Image (cartoon, rainbow, N blue to C red):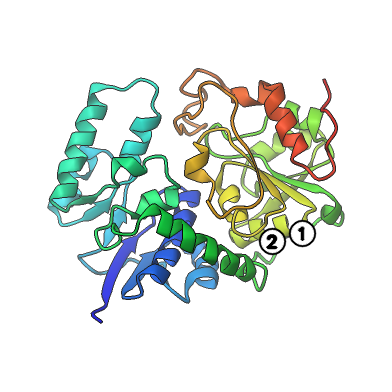
Amino acid sequence: MRRIKIYIDSNNGGNGDIWMRLVSFYTIAALIPKVTICIRVPSFFYSISSHTFKDRIEIVSSQINDRSVLEYTNLGFKDIIRPMINGKRFISPYQRAVIHDRKEKKIKDVLNIILFSILDIIGLVKVPKKKWITAYQGYLDIIGIKEISHINYETYVYQLKKDSIILLEKLKHNLPISSNLDIPLHLKDSILIFPNGTSRQFIPVLWALKHLPDAYYCFFNKDEYANEFQQAGLKTVFFYEQPGDIIYLSQQAKWTISTDSFPSHLIQYSNYSSTIVLTEVLKSRVISPSYLGEVVDAEASCHPCLHLARKSSPFCAAGYIECLNWASKTYTQNILSSLPTTKETFNE
């Protein structure tokens, strides 16, 4: 059997995107044994990636020196022309997803679809077929690759569910965690909440104070939003450079809540005693088909919304500072009803 090696540069994209790709390539490696996948990840991802996936895929953190490498990109056509001329090849699963979610389509959106379709045909950019645009993003990110494209979604999901049992067990033991990670004494009896993402996936402080004032709110140690929670008298805990910190903290808590940000993707494969609350992205795209925990879907009429970094875009595409979901009584009730000890009606 002739083996095929695919070189992937996954250094670009959000951290949640990178994790979903890794899970999906791990699943593909089981489905297509003749394919060897060598994937580059950011250096801070190397330890958790090696711990979790190295039995099936090759994980590296340095530049891959091979001209056949496929690099993930979220750039538009004009930004990748020069690199393509210089020999680079790309995977671009985002263009069509962003256009699909945009409320008002523009002429440039149509042009982008046409141009990327042409680039896909001539082999310069790998683009997933339109029919997968609302599928789980892990699948959407990989299915444009020619050697993988024959794997249908049903086959992928079947294997993913089998693999999730393996991953759940792996992520219970010998996790690479930061040496300065601190576990609060009462965390095992408490709710742990990951309240913040880079866009509109953040829990307002006033909502936290009103509805879950006794929970622990978990932040990356350099996240300045934690200051607002501390000043309001809410309990905070921090994770550091190791993604394993997020998993370990979640597993120590009685129950975990996460917005649809990076922690939610790790939690979906490591802790089913959890609730994922959707604010920004389609449920079908960011909730793993293998996840057995609780999911609270968005109620806002403007959902899904485009990802706009909060630091550079204080308002969402619909013109709001905070996601409208947090003003919805139904949304709040659904969150509280998902918790093991908070079944009563929330405070009016």
Q: Secondary structure at mark 1?
A: helix
* Residue 248: numbered disc: 2
Badge 2 amino acid = Tyr
Q: Which residue is at a point 36% across and 44% down the rendered structure image?
A: 132
Q: Which residue is at a point 85% across and 43% down the rendered structure image?
A: 341
119 relative to 47 in the view: left or right: left
Quadrant for the N terminus, please. Answer: bottom left
Residue 210 position in % (x across, y down): 80, 27
User: Quarter of the image holding residue 224?
Assistant: top right
Residue 182 position in % (x across, y down): 76, 59
Q: Which residue is at a point 51% across and 44% down the rendered structure image?
A: 286
Residue 117 position in % (x across, y down): 19, 41
The residue sitting at the top extreme is 319
Between 289 and 36, the one lying in front of the other is 289
Q: Secondary structure at mark 2?
A: helix
Residue 154 position in % (x across, y down): 42, 55
Residue labelled with disc 1:
252
Q: How many marks?
A: 2
56 relative to 185 in the view: left or right: left
Q: CA distance from mark 2 to mark 1?
A: 6 Å
222 relative to 29 in the view: left or right: right
Between 299 and 98, the one lying in front of the other is 299
Q: Are marks 2 and 1 in contact (CB under 8 Å)?
A: yes
Between 57 and 1, the one lying in front of the other is 1
